[in-house]
Amino acid sequence: MTRGDIDYRVSKMDVTYCKWHDNKVVHLICNYHGTNSTTVKRMQKDGSRKDIACPEIVPDYNRYMGGVDRADRLRQAYCINRRSKKMTMIPEDKVSLLEFRRGVSLGLMSHENAAIKRSGISGARNSPRSSPYDTPTILE
């Protein structure tokens, strides 16, 4: 193959396999573009620019590859595939969701003299809470 030669194969499911010779052989697979070709400008060894035949896939890839590279860079920087231990609790007896929430609420409201730490408010630190909801009320 010489520079600019293209070889196409199309499957029964309209997937195009393309072999294109630029400086080296490039293999491309696409289900969007057909067998149409276009040209790209390439630099010669003497510094001049020459139009080379190429598949339609190549200019689109070159135009949009920056988004893929950016996505790969962000995925690497903010990797979430970290291993961690999963902590599970096995209840001894099953409790309905309503009963569980009621128990948590009553447990949180039963600490009448618990001090609340608030940053930025002077005089309110370590003072007991004063609100009409201090005394727990059981609803049935």
Image (cartoon, rainbow, N blue to C red):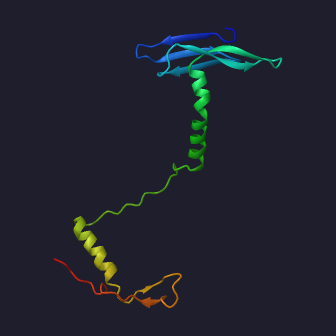
Picture layout, residue 13 above or below residue 106: above
Residue 57 position within the rendered picture, expressed as x and y whole percent measured from the top left: 56, 21
The residue most toward the top is: 1
Query: Is residue 113 toward the left or the right of residue 29 in the image?
Result: left
Looking at the rendered image, the quarter that the N terminus falls into is: top right
Query: Is residue 33 toward the left or the right of residue 66 in the image?
Result: left
Instruction: Say which residue appears at 60% left-offset and 11% top-offset.
Output: 6
Instruction: Say which residue appears at 82% left-offset and 20% top-offset.
Output: 47
Task: Report the front residue among 56 and 31.
Answer: 56
The residue most toward the left is: 140
Residue 93 is at least partly visible in this image: no
Residue 110 is at least partly visible in this image: yes
Picture layout, residue 82 above or below residue 137: above
Instruction: Say which residue appears at 52% left-offset and 50% top-offset.
Output: 80
Q: Quadrant of residue 136?
A: bottom left
Residue 10 position within the rendered picture, expressed as x and y whole percent measured from the top left: 47, 12
Task: Report the front residue among 122 and 82.
Answer: 122
The residue most toward the right is: 46
Residue 133 position within the rendered picture, expressed as x and y whole percent measured from the top left: 30, 84
Residue 38 position within the rendered picture, expressed as x and y whole percent measured from the top left: 60, 15
Looking at the rendered image, the quarter that the C terminus falls into is: bottom left
Picture layout, residue 53 above or below residue 119: above
